[in-house]
Amino acid sequence: MNELEIQKFYLYNLSILIIDNDFKQIEILKKFIESHGGICHSVDNINEAINYIETQQFDVVICDLLLDDGSTAFDFIDRTKIIDTPLTIVLTTEQEISHFLDKIVKKEIYAFLSKPYDLTTLGLLLLQASRNTKNLRKNLYFTNNLKNKIMLIQKEKDRFFFNTLTS
């Protein structure tokens, strides 16, 4: 496989959701992601995005900071963290970000890109963000598995102690 073929598929099978009200921007991103092997869905409002998140699992979400319906990416993040905690979200905007910095830090945003941005940079960021999501999901699985084992051991210990007392 030559370098061009490798580059063509470096987003292979990544599932990406785009939330943006700029249809030209969505078209550019979809074309880029799909031409590099990714699977792309797009919506222009948060309610549609939440419906997608509830029914499908994504590797990364690219979300515009301010949407036409008056909602913000922060609204989306608050609702998404209840549904899919490990999901990695990349914010984008054409706005001046200085007055959003506190919220960006508090919400633990993975990455923030100012428009216009370089598509190669975005592609590399999507790879890193998808790895982040996969690692967080794996850690969550192991944490829950460990909690269940600890609870099982504790129940067995309690049962053994109770049997010892009653015998």
Image (cartoon, grey):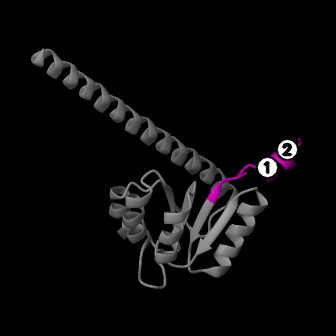
Q: Which residue is mark 2?
A: 3
Is the C-beta separation of discs 2 and 1 under 8 Å? yes
Above or below 159: residue 138: below
> Which span of residues is magenta-colored?
1-15
In the displayed image of the protein, which residue is found farthest to the front?
Answer: 167
What is the total number of numbered labels drawn onto the structure image? 2
Tell me what residue is drawn at x 76 percent, y 56 percent: 36
Q: Position of residue 136 (x, y in %)?
A: 47, 44
**Residue closest to the eye, 162 or 10:** 162
* Residue 13 drawn in magenta: yes
Q: Which residue is mark 1?
A: 7
Q: Position of residue 11 (x, y in %)?
A: 71, 52
Tell me what residue is drawn at x 42 percent, y 69 percent: 76
Above or below 162: residue 130: below
**Residue closest to the eye, 36 or 122:** 36
Q: Please give left or right for residue 8 compared with residue 71 in the image.
A: right
Tell me what residue is drawn at x 39 percent, y 68 percent: 74
Q: Which mark is residue 27?
A: none
Amino acid bearing label 1: Gln
